[in-house]
Amino acid sequence: MPTTVLLLLVTAALLRVADLESRALALAAGALAVTVQLAALGPWWARWPPAARYALPLGHIVAVGLLDLGAGLELGLVDVLVLLPLLSLSLRPGSAGISVGLGASAVVLFMPVLLVPGRPYVWLQGGIAVLVVAYLAWVVHAIVEDERRQGQQLEQARTELAVQARELRASRDVLNSIVQAATEQAIVGMDRHGVVLTANSGAERILDRDAEELVGTSFTDLVDPAVLAQRVARDASSPLAVVLGAAASGGTGVSEWPVVLPDGSSRPLEIVVTPRPAIEPLPAGFVLVGTDVSARHEEQRLQDEFIGLVSHELRTPLSSILSYLELLRLDRAPLSEDQRGYLEVVERNAVRLRQLVDDLLLSAQLVHGLSWAPEELDVVEVVHAAVATQQPAARAAEVELRIAGDGEVPLVSDAQRLGQVVDNLLSNAVKHSPPGASVVVTIERVPGPDGGRAAAVRVRDEGPGIAADELARLTERFYRTRDTRRRRVRGVGLGLSLVKTIVDEHGGTLTIDSTPGAGTEVRVVVPDLPQAGD
């Protein structure tokens, strides 16, 4: 439309000039411009194939050429008008439109050179005009193509975002339905401060509270306050950090807590806490998944009762057997070498069986808590006593027991419990060491929590080592490694579980480092026990 109006205005102006070269050509140019405009306004325009639509801007270029001829070629008055339809073609996608437009424009601009020979300046005029309009047309074409490409990319991105949004909404709906269907687990969403934001039906059932009652409550208020205070004092941390565990620093916290129900009773809950990014409409925080382990505790209690009952029933006849063996040794009646050998075999197996029964009894006692008799002692003396106890077994296995370091390592502890820890560590190290190997025990002073005293005991052996996938299970009750079962090493898998329980109740730590083929090192760190009146 603007090109048509401008052509008609120029045509009307030129028709008023008396010395016009050809009024007929000028009129033809105006008529062609009007014809092009009428064609563009017709309803059939939208049905034309894309290539045929080049005809309308080309019609305008022909009209400019006719007008140029009618005005007089040597003047070149209307050459600049060719830029308008050329720009229209430059706006078309691809390079075909601008190429056709430049070709047609070049013909119009060079007509003076072809039809009016002998005038060198006309070559210069035509060349400059072609370069100018070509530059302008290509700049416009490049800008529009870039915008078109960005628009396509934006539309593609918008489409992909819409698809992802639909998938996200669908995933969220599926996840919500799964969370609500998980009635056996309490799934709780919390903010960074531990305040409950959402809770599923499983949380309502396990915690015995409605979701509306749980929302807005700090999860730390749901756990047993006495247990929380004890663990806060032990870890010297905030209540929330103790409940979150490793999740507070970006990891996964796994722990067990007794939660208090509205009726005042408690229920043991094993919780797994993981960080959660911000998801509309919830801010960033944590996801807590809790499992009621009451049935597991009851099963464990019944198992321990059975173990305790059986162990008591076994210990009485064992004590009688060992007593009569001792009487036989004191009897002056001569015994043959074979008889003495038989008695030694009976005694050795009876002692071994009594040790096993004692371990089972201790394992049952641990469930109900240990009794402690704290006193000031020297850890080095406790270790020396344990080494002396294990020396016969070490000599029989051809294993050397050595103590590294000397001097006193004072500590407030229970000599019996600490001795049980060292005994079990040494017994394991000896049983798993090959003949000719060494087991080294190291005792040292280390800083305790809050700047107090602590002692570290390390037991290093030269055994076959432990596979990485089994390290985490070593402290489980009755767990025995594949290598232990393969080599039929004596034991029932209680030693390290007893060690861990004693060390945990002592407020210490137990770490196990092992490399297959390079031996194992167990390190126990225990601080001072609080004494009566502390």
Image (cartoon, helix red, strand yellow):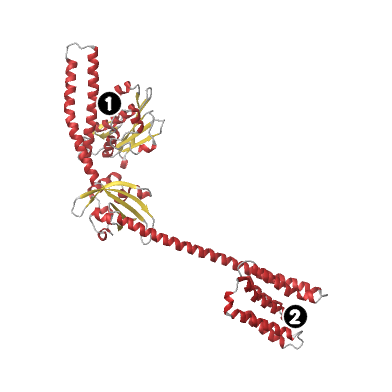
Q: Quadrant of the C terminus?
A: top left
Residues 271 and 220: in front is 271
Location of mark 1 (residue) = 385
- Image position of 63 with respect to 255: above or below: below
- Image position of 68 with respect to 177: above or below: below
Image point (26%, 61%), residue name: 212
What is the x, y in percent for residue 36? Answer: 64, 80
Q: Nearer the viewer, mark 2 or mark 1?
A: 2
Image point (53%, 63%), residue name: 153
What's the mark number on residue 272? none
Local secondary structure at mark 2: helix
What is the x, y in percent for residue 387? Answer: 30, 25
Q: Quadrant of the N terminus?
A: bottom right
Residues 117 and 389: in front is 117
- Between the residue at mark 2 and the residue at mark 1, the CA separation in whole angstroms equals 123 Å
Which one is earlier in the sequence, the residue at label 2 or at label 1? 2
- Image position of 328 with respect to 257: above or below: above
Location of mark 2 (residue) = 69
The kind of residue tagged 1 is Ala
Q: Is residue 466 visible?
A: yes
Q: Within 10 Å of the Cα at label 1, are there few (<14), some (14-19), or many (20+) other Cα atoms?
A: some
Q: Quadrant of residue 140?
A: bottom right
What is the x, y in percent for residue 506? Answer: 26, 38
